[in-house]
């Protein structure tokens, strides 16, 4: 197991950082499916695993000049309180319910990614609706980080695309928000003693290597074609791991 974990971390870290996400959903599925951790322990560990690679990716995005701090700060205003609330109530959720919550999120994220592969969003132009949407998607992202230990990048990127940002801007802005909410979520989960530090460190080493190497390699390829191929594969992976999580309950 400890041999395959860094390999999986390398693959996920490289692929996800190239698409602008945090990857916690994939790390969570690896920790539950391969590492056989409980859903609550995997939730905390996934934040620990994904944070360093996310910080590396966020710095790279910042250097491109694509970060939209106004929209990002609006999402942070909503995401931070919901992250704190979600982290505090997570320990009171029974393990079976916890597993079903993560299963539902996996399925929703997987379906969302599949739809994004074949559907082009129409930007929202009304300023009031734009602001409202940033707050709503920020709350959803924060709850995902706090309760499920996911990075929450799915709702952020989806919301930013809907209000008219480009994919590059949405990925960069999302990474900025995710670094802050992941730090808060990791601290709150770690204080509850749920984190599997050893297994997480092994997986994190692979993720760091992948996040450092993959962008250089993928920069030589057509980004639209890479996204077109990888997004449906990753969505199916999420759906399958979600099914694996609840099939034995």
Image (tube, rainbow, N blue to C red):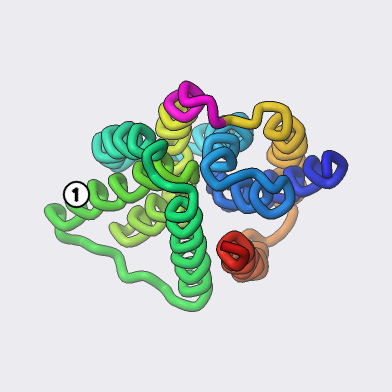
Of residues 227 and 42, which is closer to you in this image? 42
Left or right, 19 with reference to 141? right
Residue 81 picture location, percent across and down: 27, 34
Furthest residue in direction right, as rendered: 3
Residue 3 picture location, percent across and down: 87, 42
Task: Say if residue 22 shows up in the picture.
Answer: yes
Residue located at (67% from left, 63% from top): 226
Please say whether residue 190 is one of the residues in the magenta stretch: yes
The relative height of residue 33 versus residue 194 in the rendered view (above or below) is below
Left or right, 106 with reference to 35? left
Q: How many labels does the image show?
A: 1
The relative height of residue 19 versus residue 151 in the rendered view (above or below) is below
Of residues 223 and 175, which is closer to you in this image? 175
Left or right, 6 with reference to 103? right
Q: Mark 1 points at which residue?
A: 131
The relative height of residue 183 versus residue 13 in the rendered view (above or below) is above
Of residues 75 and 87, which is closer to you in this image? 87
- How packed mark 1 is, by other alpha carbons closer than 10 Å (few <14, some 14-19, many 20 or more), is some
Residue 188 picture location, percent across and down: 42, 26
Quadrant location of residue 243?
bottom right
Residue located at (34% from left, 32% from top): 88
Please say whether residue 141 is one of the residues in the magenta stretch: no
Task: Say if residue 73 shows up in the picture.
Answer: no
Of residues 80 and 208, which is closer to you in this image? 80
What segment is highlighted magenta in the picture?
A: 187-194
Residue located at (31% from left, 70% from top): 122
């Amino acid at each position: 197991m400890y041999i395959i974990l860094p390999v999986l971390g390398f693959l996920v870290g490289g692929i996800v950082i190239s698409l602008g996400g945090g990857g916690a959903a994939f790390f969570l599925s690896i920790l539950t499916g391969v590492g056989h951790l409980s859903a609550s322990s995997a939730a905390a560990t996934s934040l620990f695993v994904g944070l360093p690679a996310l910080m590396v990716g966020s710095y790279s995005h910042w250097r491109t000049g694509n970060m939209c701090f106004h929209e990002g700060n609006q999402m942070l205003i909503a995401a931070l309180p919901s992250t704190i609330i979600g982290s505090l109530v997570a320990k009171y959720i029974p393990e079976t319910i916890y597993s079903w919550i993560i299963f539902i999120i996996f399925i929703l994220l997987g379906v969302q990614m599949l739809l994004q592969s074949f559907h082009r969003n129409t930007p929202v132009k009304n300023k009031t609706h734009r602001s409202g949407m940033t707050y709503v998607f920020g709350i959803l992202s924060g709850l995902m980080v706090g309760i499920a230990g996911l990075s929450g990048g799915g709702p952020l990127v989806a919301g930013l695309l809907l209000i008219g940002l480009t994919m590059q801007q949405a990925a960069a802005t999302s990474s900025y928000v995710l670094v802050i909410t992941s730090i808060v979520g990791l601290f709150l989960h770690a204080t509850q003693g749920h984190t599997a530090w050893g297994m997480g460190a092994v997986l994190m080493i692979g993720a760091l290597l992948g996040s450092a190497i993959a962008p250089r390699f993928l920069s030589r390829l057509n980004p639209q074609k890479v996204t077109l191929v990888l997004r449906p594969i990753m969505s199916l992976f999420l759906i399958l791991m979600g099914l694996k999580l609840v099939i034995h309950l």
